[in-house]
Image (cartoon, grey):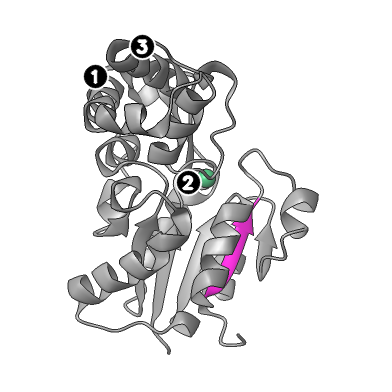
C-alpha cells in the first residue's frame, strides 16, 4: 500500500464555529485599531486569518502599512480573546468526522496533517474543544504565509520532518470545503477532495473541478477508499 499524506482544512470541513468567531475578531480589531472594519459582513470562507484582517480593515479605508504596524498585536489579541471566549458549545463537529479520523489514524500508511487558514493557536483551540487535536501532529497555518497557496509546500516540508518520509504530490490529498482548498491541491499537483459541509453547495464546488466531491463525510468507508485510491 502506498503511503498517504492527508491534509485537512478545519472550518466547514471538520467542524463549524458559531458566531463567537466573528464577534471575537471584531472586538480584537476594535481594541487594536479602533474599528472592526467590515468584519460583521465579510466572507471568511477559505481565507487566511491574516488576509481577513487586512481585507476587513482596508474596507474601512486603512492602508496596508498602517495595518501592518499593529498586525502582530491584533493577531495576539484575537487569539487570546478567542481562547478565552470559545467553549465546546460553540463548536459543532461535522457528521462522520470523528469516525473518519479514527479510521484514518488506524491505517499505518496514512499520515494526517492540517492545511488551514487559521492561526495555529486559535485553530488548535477549535480542535481541542471537541477532542480531535491529537489526530494532527503537524500542519501549515495562517501564521506561515498570507497566501493559502503557499501553504502546501510548507505542509509537505513539515510532514517530512515529522515522519522522516518524503511525500510526493501523488501521495498527497488535500481536503476542504472551498475552491481555495481545491486550488491548493492544484498548486501542488496533489489530489483534491471537496466536501459540501461549509458554505458552498455540491454544484458550486463542482464548478472548480475537485478530483472527488462529497456531500458530507457520513459514508466514511467511501472517503477512506478515495483517499487510498491509486488512480491519480
Ligand atoms: Mg474551510
| Label 3 SS | helix
> Which residue is found at the position 80% from the left and 51% from the top?
203
Name the residue tied to disc 2: 14
Query: Distance of mark 2 from mark 1, alpha carbons?
Result: 21 Å
Q: Nearer the viewer, mark 2 or mark 3?
A: 3
Q: Quadrant of residue 197?
A: top right
**Residue 182 occupies quadrant:** bottom right
Q: Relative to 160, does residue 40 appear above or below in the rendering? A: above
Q: Which residue is disc 3 drawn over?
A: 30
Magenta stretch contains residue 158: no
Identify which residue, 121 or 96, lies in the foreground: 121
Residue positioned 35% across, 9% down in the render: 34
Badge 2 marks a residue whose secondary structure is loop
- Closer to the chain start, of discs 2 and 3, is 2
Q: Nearer the viewer, mark 1 or mark 3?
A: 3
Q: Which residue is mark 1?
A: 84
Q: What percent of the width, then of the height, locates residue 179?
A: 63, 54
CB at disc 1 and ligand 1 closer than 8 Å: no
Q: In the image, is residue 192 part of the stretch drawn in magenta?
A: yes
Residue 220 in sight from this viewpoint? no
Closer to the chain start, of discs 2 and 1, is: 2
Question: Which residue is pictured at 45% across the width and 54% down the height?
Answer: 148
The quadrant of the rendering that contains the C terminus is bottom right
- On screen, residue 177 versus residue 131, left or right, reads right
In front of the other: 53 or 172: 53
Badge 1: residue crowd in 10 Å (few <14, some 14–19, many ≥20) = few
**From the viewer's perspective, is residue 101 above or below residue 83?**
below
Q: Which residues are magenta?
A: 190-195
Q: Position of residue 83 (x, y in %)?
A: 25, 25
Disc number at residue 193?
none
Amino acid at each position: 500500500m502506498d503511503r498517504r499524506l492527508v491534509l485537512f482544512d478545519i472550518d466547514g470541513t471538520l467542524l463549524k464555529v458559531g458566531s463567537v468567531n466573528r464577534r471575537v475578531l471584531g472586538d480584537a480589531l476594535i481594541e487594536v485599531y479602533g474599528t472592526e472594519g467590515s468584519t460583521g459582513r465579510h466572507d471568511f470562507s477559505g481565507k487566511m486569518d491574516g488576509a481577513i484582517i487586512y481585507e476587513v480593515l482596508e474596507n474601512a479605508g486603512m492602508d496596508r502599512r498602517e495595518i501592518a504596524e499593529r498586525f502582530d498585536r491584533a493577531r495576539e489579541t484575537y487569539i487570546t480573546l478567542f481562547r478565552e471566549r470559545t467553549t465546546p458549545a460553540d463548536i459543532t463537529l461535522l457528521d462522520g468526522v470523528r469516525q473518519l479520523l479514527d479510521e484514518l489514524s488506524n491505517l499505518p500508511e496514512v499520515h494526517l496533517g492540517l492545511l488551514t487558514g487559521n492561526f495555529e493557536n486559535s485553530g488548535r483551540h477549535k480542535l481541542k474543544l471537541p477532542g480531535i487535536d491529537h489526530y494532527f501532529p503537524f500542519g501549515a497555518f495562517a501564521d506561515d504565509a498570507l497566501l493559502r497557496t503557499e501553504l502546501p509546500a510548507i505542509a509537505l516540508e513539515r510532514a517530512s520532518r515529522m515522519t522522516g518520509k518524503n511525500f510526493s504530490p501523488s501521495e498527497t490529498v488535500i481536503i476542504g470545503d472551498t475552491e481555495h482548498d481545491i486550488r491548493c491541491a492544484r498548486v501542488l499537483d496533489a489530489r483534491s477532495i471537496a466536501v459540501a459541509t461549509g458554505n458552498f453547495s455540491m454544484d458550486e464546488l463542482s464548478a472548480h473541478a475537485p478530483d472527488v466531491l462529497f456531500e458530507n463525510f457520513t459514508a466514511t468507508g467511501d472517503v477512506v477508499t478515495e483517499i487510498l485510491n491509486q488512480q491519480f
